Image (cartoon, rainbow, N blue to C red):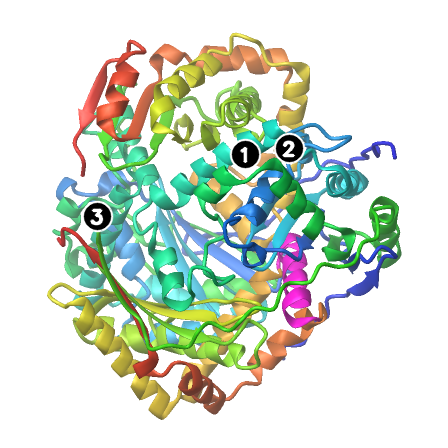
Amino acid sequence: MNRPEVRLGTPWHFPTPTIVRLGNGLSVWHFHLPGQHVATYEVVLPTQLTYEERDKEGIGNVTLHAIDEGTRTHPDGAIGELLEAQGTTLHGGTRYRYSTFGGQTPSRRLREVLPLFAEVLSEPAYAERDVAHHVEAQIAGYASRLASPAAANRIALREALFEPDHREARPTGGTPETLVNITAADAVQWHADHFSPAGATLVVAGALELDEVLAGISGWQGAPPVADGLRPASPLQAPKVVVVDHPDAVQATLAVGTRTVTRHDARWPALRVAGHAVAGAIASRLNLELRERMGYTYGIRGGFTPGADEGQFTVGGSVRTEVAGDAVARMLEGLALGTPLTEQEAHDARQFLIGIAPLANETSADIVNQGATLAGSGLGPDYLNAHFAQLAGVTAEQATVAFREVIDPAQLTIAVTGAAAELVPELEGLGLEVSLRPAP
Amino acid sequence: MTQADLHFELSQHRLDNGMHVVVAPDHDAPGVAVNIWVEVGSADEVAGRTGFAHLFEHLMFQGSANVASGEHMATVEALGGTVNATTSSDRTNYFETVPRGALDLALWMEADRFESLAITPENFEAQRQVVKEEKRQRYDNQPYGDLLELLVAQHFNPDHPYGHLTIGSMEDLDASSLDDVAGFFRAWYPASNLRLVLCGPVSDDEGLALAAKYFGHLPSAPKPERAPIAAAEVGNPVDTSVSRPVPHSLSYLSWATPPAAHADVPALDLALSVLSDGHASRLHRSLVKRSDVAYEVHGGMLTNRSTDSITTMISRPADGVTLEQVSDAVLDGLARFLDEGPTEEELARAVAQYERDWLWDLATTSGRSDAINEAWLVHGDPHRLNTYLAEVLALTPDDLRAAAAKWLAPEGAHRLLYRAEAPR
């Protein structure tokens, strides 16, 4: 039987929300999706972690996690019972430039839930015991991350990419040394300073009408947030090679990365195409080389990720300890892009990045996550469709040129977590100068 | 208003070669999910040849008569689709979601590998190495990486079909020959042992015609049957205590609970939810919020198709509390629950959470097609996808109490105490 032909349909477009600006300063992006049984909603707060005091880093994250333990109207877990009785789960997350707080609820129950959600946003109780519990949970979570080679390696890479005084050099959720200083009073203050509808965006998607959304969220009250402003830059750091010693590790966990331009740069679409072909795809150059040809690894993945002000390029995976040096050498060689990308590689990458969009935006949560990312980065919902149009025009040559301009293998920072006694000589054998971190 | 009765359209067919097909049209979906369950898992492996079911999850992407090694994944990705495979004790799952215009190609590639998989020495050796790295990455190089193995060992002897993990033994993989591997494929991968679910913008007639067009010529061979599997030997509760270089000490209490299709499973699931799911749950309230006994309490169920499942209650003790003390406190809370049963409010919360989780699992064609295969293999009826939620919503507080009392006797709990070597 002959190989069937493929007939791809018309290009897909990110849905257009109805956008409403309320009197309290809240913007609402409403995606009406009648087919979605489960609704998703997320508030994007333009809160930067640079506001955190140095010795209380993690306060933003703790405040977010403790927010739904009780309200003044429904204290001591009562609000949680009401939310759960409507099938609701809430979650929050902090990033360096913004925070998000939202949840998921069966669409048919959302009308009952939004006023409760507004109550949580407006009048959280922050009982001392609850805040202490979340401080403990964050400290425990940090210890768990350090014990996980992949997470420990990410922390080491980030630390190496920024100058030590810069907030982005350190974990968003703080460290045990800073978390331990956080009190309930700090959470109350952080909430008062930053949880305001003024300047925030509510992104909501599901089988619910706009007027029901607006009626539900209108109860959110809050003083204006503290003024925007603190956004210190961190100069690009000299490349480093960091080994985090996990003496008993049975593998080496690798990450190679650098800080890059982001969506504002005209080369961004070309960089995404190149990043996918080199490291993002299952059939990427690096995965084919290190997994399929060499059998060194279960998989190598990576690519460019955008941020509000700047982006990052990272590639990583876990490899056998005794071939870690060779794996790094092959990665660096691949990233030099000595052989230009072929038209076929560029075609496949374009097709994936554009073609995956409808599947990647199938659910209410997909749409809301995407919308929240755009709102948090100061972009509108029309950004994506323009981006897809640009992606479609990227040639192999443009992708190759952009990648070579932005990624210089000699300027990449390398983090490796594993058995240092074996890893350090392997890396030094490549002519790299290694800085060793003791086991956590 | 209730949406407990779901109305996902689906129709069930059987090709002449014995292959089973379900078509679940969803004309608004962005892509078609192609979900194939091969009715073989690690519980079908024989002693000394473990890890074979999972090895095929890898080999199946290494090429066939008309598809080169790696081409299947690369092709689907380049069409803007998603593709992968998973293995459990009970089944091996191959799946992709593709744009409607690429459905023919996806089915053609699937059929090609079931018909003519390239089981070569080179592919076998390369994937044996990749599997070893997978085991290191997912188990050996992770904190708590041996926890699941220790838990399973409390419930099953090593030679029981459910007594080993799906990743298998690397020694077994090293000791096996290409003939062993080819024999496993011949035994378990005929058309009669496959269930294909198509979910997305494809009509029932189209779906069936496509399945027949691409899979209909696969040879007809009798469906292999799983060997009878003995129940786990019911012995006294097992106590296991280990020390490892991990950040936190954990207590795992566990019970042998009935197989996945047993009528008590939904009530047991909700009972676990009332006890330990979320901050409004009983044990979180009594041990974390109202006293300083635990920092975390969670419940979970590892369901098995052909033998007992394993239900767990996990707790992390608060500072100054021993693993023995936190375990006893969990069992005390459980005993009170068995005595009182849940309140109407507790049940309503558990039901509402279940409703959201269930609807969420069905929110994508990929998730729905997998849920259809699960309902089909485990419960024998794909239509159960539409009725299961209503069964859960009809449960009463006494159903939960009775199911928990029957299966979660505090004195019958196995204890796995996983101690951090250097407590903080």
Mark 1 / mark 3, whichever is N-terminal: 1
The quadrant of the picture occupied by the C terminus of chain A is top left
* SS at mark 2 in the image: loop
* Residue A52 is covered by the magenta coloring: no
Left or right, residue A394 beside residue A106: right
Which x, y percent locates residue B70? 64, 30
Q: Is B287 in front, or is B250? A: B250
Residue at mark 3: B245
Gap in Å between the C-alphas at discs 1 and 3? 30 Å
Amino acid type indicated by mark 1:
Gln
Look at 46% across and 91% down and name the residue there: B398
When the figure is inspected, residue A60 is found, relative to residue A154, above or below; the finding is below
* Residue B377 is covered by the magenta coloring: yes
Which x, y percent locates residue A209? 61, 63
Q: What is the chain identity of the residue bearing mark 1? A: B
Q: Which mark is residue B127?
A: 1
Q: Which mark is residue A144?
A: none
Q: Which mark is residue B62?
A: 2
Left or right, residue A440 beside residue A96: left
Gap in Å between the C-alphas at discs 3 and 2? 38 Å
The quadrant of the picture occupied by the N terminus of chain A is top right
Q: Is residue B92 visible?
A: yes
Which x, y percent locates residue B115? 77, 41
Magenta-colored segment: predominant secondary structure:
helix
